[in-house]
Amino acid sequence: MKSKLPAPALLVDLAREAGARFAAVPVSRFPVGAALVGATTGKVYFGANFEIAGPSIAQTVHAEQAAFVNAWHAGERGVAALAVTHNPCGHCRQFLAETLGADFPIYVAGEKPATLTTLLPRAFGPRDLGKSKPLMATAPVKLALAGKHDALTAAALDAARKSYAPHTKGHMGVALELKDGRVFAGRYAESAAYNPSLPALQSALILRHLAGAKSPIARAAIVGSRKAQFDETLRAQEMLAWLAPKAKVAVALA
Ligand SMILES: [Zn+2]
């Protein structure tokens, strides 16, 4: 990155601001904020923890993952620094270590500056499974749909192409069209350890939330890969049926 990093104290203040503005914590009542500096542009991306009471505890997204989603979908290809209001949990340390692919500074409110390596030494990651490209630096995969499809499905297909699933080939994208016409497309981000993986629908919901979009979901398109070893399209449909029972949902395999 060419530009200078913002001062750590400023980044921590931005993380606090992100938590205050965007934490959605109906269950835990424990807001967490994050501010991530993209390595490509030097821009700062907000993230906050995001909980949906009801369907499943697995739908919870932490502030660090939300900030990552925000930066990755904006085209960032690495992370220059991260600030968080609280110490990252083990789950987030794993996710950050294997998906961002570089040892960047981490500033936590009230703590000494650290790096990812000091917070998670001897990390397990994609390299242990023979994958050398970290998540943010991976090129889109070739996926195609047979026949005609509308713009919303095209957005989901584009997200699926840019999703990260080198371990299971479960590439997937979800596009949500709101009643006000805005579209948010989310990509799947796979962990080498599988469990901190971030489903495509959650990425789309996070982007919608961070954009401050309140309009309900009118339509959704899900595009998964035929080569997937786990069919996450089923879980996305189930979740959408709970979140937006009246929304029309199109599912296609590429
Ligand atoms: Zn966490």
Image (cartoon, rainbow, N blue to C red):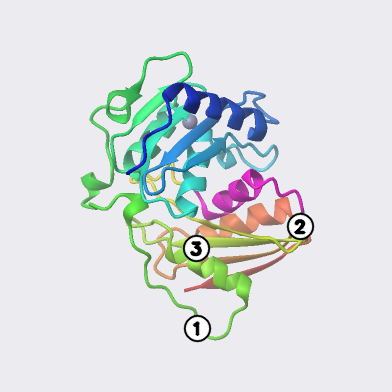
Q: Secondary structure at mark 1?
A: loop
Determine the CA span between mark 3 and mark 1. 17 Å
Residue 20 visible from this viewpoint: yes
Q: Secondary structure at mark 3?
A: helix
Q: Quadrant of residue 143?
A: bottom left
Disc 3 or 1, which lies upstream in sequence? 1
Mark 1 = which residue? 146
How many numbered dots are placed on residues in this image? 3
Q: Residues within 10 Å of mark 3 (few under 14, many from 20)?
A: many
Mark 2 = which residue? 245
Which residue occupies the extreme bottom position in the image?
147
Residue 173: x and y in percent read: 52, 62
Q: Is residue 39 left or right of residue 160?
A: left
Q: Secondary structure at mark 2?
A: loop
Disc 2 or 3, which lies upstream in sequence? 3
Q: Amino acid at mark 2?
A: Pro
Determine the CA span between mark 2 and mark 3. 23 Å
Q: Quadrant of residue 1?
A: top left
Viewer-nearest residue: 223 or 185: 185
Q: Which mark is residue 159?
A: 3
Determine the CA span between mark 2 and mark 1. 28 Å
Whether the magenta-drawn stretch holds residue 208 is answered as: yes
Q: Is residue 252 left or right of residue 194?
A: right
Viewer-nearest residue: 122 or 194: 122
Residue at 39% in and 68% down = 227
Which residue occupies the extreme front position in the image?
3
Q: Amino acid at mark 3?
A: Ala
Q: Residues within 10 Å of mark 1 (few under 14, many from 20)?
A: few
Magenta segment range? 198-215
Residue 75: x and y in percent read: 44, 55
Mark 1 CB within 8 Å of ligand 1: no
